[in-house]
């Protein structure tokens, strides 16, 4: 792993969520360097895409068909209640999260 990859993963581990633009601005890397780092960090097990994360963790979530996203809270999508959040994860189109990267437990353990 390159020094730049370590710099990026340390930055990601330090916060909750960042856009590519925020990462570029705060780490001083170019977009091309960031994309290469994403590839390396994913290959090394420090990042995973959101689709893989959902597939891997789906069994640990409540088995309700309309499970809410973590930002909503557990009970916002009950069918008898009005939604207190913007939407349930089931109704979010894939294109809205296909480029999301999730920091893995391995990254947190090694770079926290």
Image (cartoon, rainbow, N blue to C red):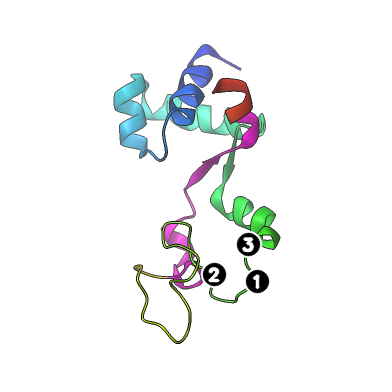
Task: Give yes or no for contact between labels 3 and 1 (Cβ–Cβ under 8 Å).
Answer: yes
Which residue is drawn at the image coordinates 52% and 27% (left, top)?
37
Which residue is drawn at the image coordinates 42% and 39% (left, top)?
16
Question: Considering the image in quadrants, where does the N terminus appear?
Answer: top right
Q: Which residues are magenta?
A: 88-107
- Residue in the foreground of this view, choosing between 55 and 15: 15
Q: Position of residue 7 (x, y in %)?
A: 47, 18
Circle 1 crowding by C-alpha within 10 Å: few under 14, some 14–19, many from 20:
few
- Residue in the foreground of this view, choosing between 49 and 108: 108
Alpha carbon separation for disc pair 3 and 2 = 8 Å
Q: Quadrant of residue 112?
A: top right
Q: Is residue 39 magenta?
A: no
Can you say whether 71 is above or below 80 in the image? Answer: above
Q: Position of residue 71 (x, y in %)?
A: 42, 57
Residue that numbered label 3 is attached to: 61
Which residue is drawn at the image coordinates 47% and 32% (left, top)?
35
Can you say whether 96 is above or below 85 in the image? Answer: above
């Amino acid at each position: 792993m390159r020094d730049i990859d370590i710099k990026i993963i340390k930055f990601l581990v330090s916060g909750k969520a960042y856009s590519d633009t925020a990462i570029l601005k705060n780490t001083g890397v170019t977009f091309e360097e960031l994309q290469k780092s994403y590839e390396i960090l994913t290959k090394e097990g420090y990042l995973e895409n959101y689709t893989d994360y959902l597939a891997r963790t789906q069994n640990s979530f409540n088995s309700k068909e309309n499970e809410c996203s973590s930002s909503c809270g557990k009970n916002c999508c009950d069918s008898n209640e009005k939604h207190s959040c913007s939407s349930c994860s089931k109704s979010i189109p894939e294109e809205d999260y296909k480029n999301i990267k999730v920091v893995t437990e391995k990254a947190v353990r090694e770079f926290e």
